[in-house]
Amino acid sequence: MSADNFLEVRGLKKYFDVGRPTWFSGESRSLHAVDGVDFTLRHSEVIALVGESGCGKSTLALLLMGLEDPTAGTVTFEGRDITHLDDHQRKDLRRKIQMVFQDPYESLNPTQNIEEIVTEPLAVHGIANTPDRDERVKKAMEDAGLKPAEVYLKRYPHELSGGQRQRVVIAAALVLEPEIILADEPVSMLDVSIRAEIINLLAELRITRQIAVIFITHDLGSVGFFADRVAVMYLGRIVEIGTMLEVLEKPQHPYTKALISVIPVPNPRLRHERIILQGETPNPIDIPSGCRFHPRCPVAFATCKVSDPPFVTLSKTHQAACLLLVK
Amino acid sequence: MKRWRYLSGKISWALFTILFVIVLNFFLFRILPGDPARAGVRDPRLTRENIEAIRVRYGLDKPIINCFESLNPVKIGSCVVNPLDTQFFIYIGNLLQGDMMISFHTNRPVTEILSERLWNTVILIGAGQILAIIVGVLFGMFSAWKARTSLDYASLTISLVAWSIPTFWLGVILLFWGSNNGMPIAGMSTPGMSSYPLLTQWGDIARHMFLPTLTYTIVYMGEYMLIMRSSLLDVLSEDYILTAKAKGLSIFQILKDHAIKNAMLPLVTIIAINLGFTVGGVIQIETVFSWPGLGMTTVEALNRRDFPVLQGAFLLIAVAVILSNLLADLAYSYLDPRVKTE
């Protein structure tokens, strides 16, 4: 592909074994957490991965970070295959791809103070003793919105609010000057009033530091602010991907339509009918035949039960996987 | 300032508890059936006058406290006795002067007996405790690291079995094993050792310590192992461990900088509480191996209704437990920044 695709994911799959074969049932079953995901990420681009809980978003993040080993598929970063690397090879890469986790109450070690937390990545990568260390730590913290940095250095995580903690997590990611930040539901544990601040912070970083962001969320409403492109995931697969406007204004996949229809609209005159999906997300151990969305799809027809829909290209940037679009 | 207030609050609670124990100790043993004057000297030839003489000698003829001759609620005594002339206030008065009175049985001051026996217990159980902590924690870490493998299950089973074995039973088994292998099985030293050089004497004590220490280590190691394992597994599932992995820390660095420090926190409490009970000695082990420690002293004193020794031993144990709890609190507030020191 073009040189602009600096992170490229092709056919990525991750199956987890659930239950070994026993004397009573001979087959071993597996959970299809991520089941064939393709997408590309460009330089300083923000892509939002949207989906219900259990659709494989977080597993996808762990795969991209190399914290889980994929069952199949490839991840290419700057033209280099990074799918299977050992710890030593991966270490260098970790500087360039950093992750922000969902729960800022759990992702900080309670016995370390903020300075130790933000400095640690530098120490790990052997750049702790450079003279500009303090400068780097301070800059990362201030870029993450912890100003002035001196006030926070000696504090402990439990002394900070949720939003401040998440800023510490972001600062600890920024200090290595990464090129990609993978944010796994970074705002879902925060108060609504603080969510916008953190999202704005990520949007700023992308401008000031040219960082690409993979923003994983279950809340389609919050991505409209700053994502360039949106990918909608369902049961381990991307079902629709396109620019933010294409997906939000002209959704083509019935699942995307349903998700968008339930975003609260402040203006009562603009309110439209909500599409409420029936049933639960199917168990990823027993994936439905044909189109995996058909048991819940309001517009499904007979063929959907047997035929797996291909990706249909709707525009240069917009693709969706639905049999209704095939004709 | 805040820290000082936290500290003084803790200390005043500890003092209050000790005061309570002092009062409780006195009545606790006097509720026991049995007469110290008879239980101490089991001799049928003892006449009524002899018994009375023993009672007078140890002050047992005095009323226990105003209105009570004894702790028998039916026998209400005179309430007009001088309170300072009752057993209870004599006990309190002596204690305030640091005097724990004289043993009914051996006629030696209780402080002297206890300080001698305390030391014996501390070296025995102290060694066992330290070994149990080291072995248990290392074993637990290993097990958590190899979680859900056959190695983990094997060490889990060993620890559970070790923890559930009755101490005295294990002691007796090891005693038989030791006696077949030429190990000393009773007491603290070989008679006549005192004429040898100091180093030989110590070697002799160490040989005597081997079996009881082994018993103690095996039984308590299981507890530490199980707690360390589950605590470490808990910590390893936290997001900050995943974050550390994502930052490129090696497994060793993660364990050293993030996991172990947090996993040790619950252990600190248990270690401190167990250290307190160290002083009490493990009665079963000391009895099986005839180790002249506090535990055995307590059992002997109980059989003879030797109130002063019992009161002294219980006070010592209570103070040790309270002090080590205080120490645990302080250590905790130092190790875990989340524990507010106010």
Image (spheres, coloured by chain):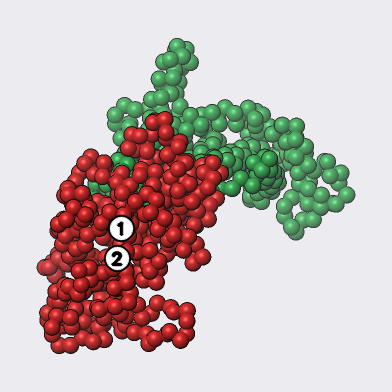
Chain colours: A red, B green
> What residue is at 33 percent from the left and 47 percent from the top?
A178
Residue A191, percent across and down? 50, 64
Of all residues, the one furthest to the right in this rendering is: B80
- Name above or below for residue B60 compared with residue B234: above
Sequence-wise first label, 2 or 1: 1
Who is closer to the viewer here, A34 or A245? A245
Observer able to see residue B227: no
**Would you say the residues marked 2 and 1 are in contact, meaning their CB atoms lie under 8 Å apart?**
yes
Q: Is residue A166 left or right of residue A259?
A: right
Residue A244, percent across and down? 32, 69
Secondary structure state at the residue bearing disc 2: strand
Q: Is residue B132 left or right of residue B306?
A: left
Who is closer to the viewer here, B94 or B73? B94
- Label 1 resides on the chain identified as A
- Name the image quarter holding the N terminus of chain B: top right
Identify residue for label 2: A229
Residues behind callouts 2 and 1 on a single chain: yes
Observer able to see residue A240: yes
Crowdedness near tag 1: few (<14), some (14–19) or many (≥20) residues, C-alpha within 10 Å: many
- Name above or below for residue B24 compared with residue B188: below
- Label 2 resides on the chain identified as A
Identify residue for label 1: A45
Dividing the picture into quadrants, the one containing residue A207 is bottom left
> What residue is at 18 percent from the left and 83 percent from the top?
A324
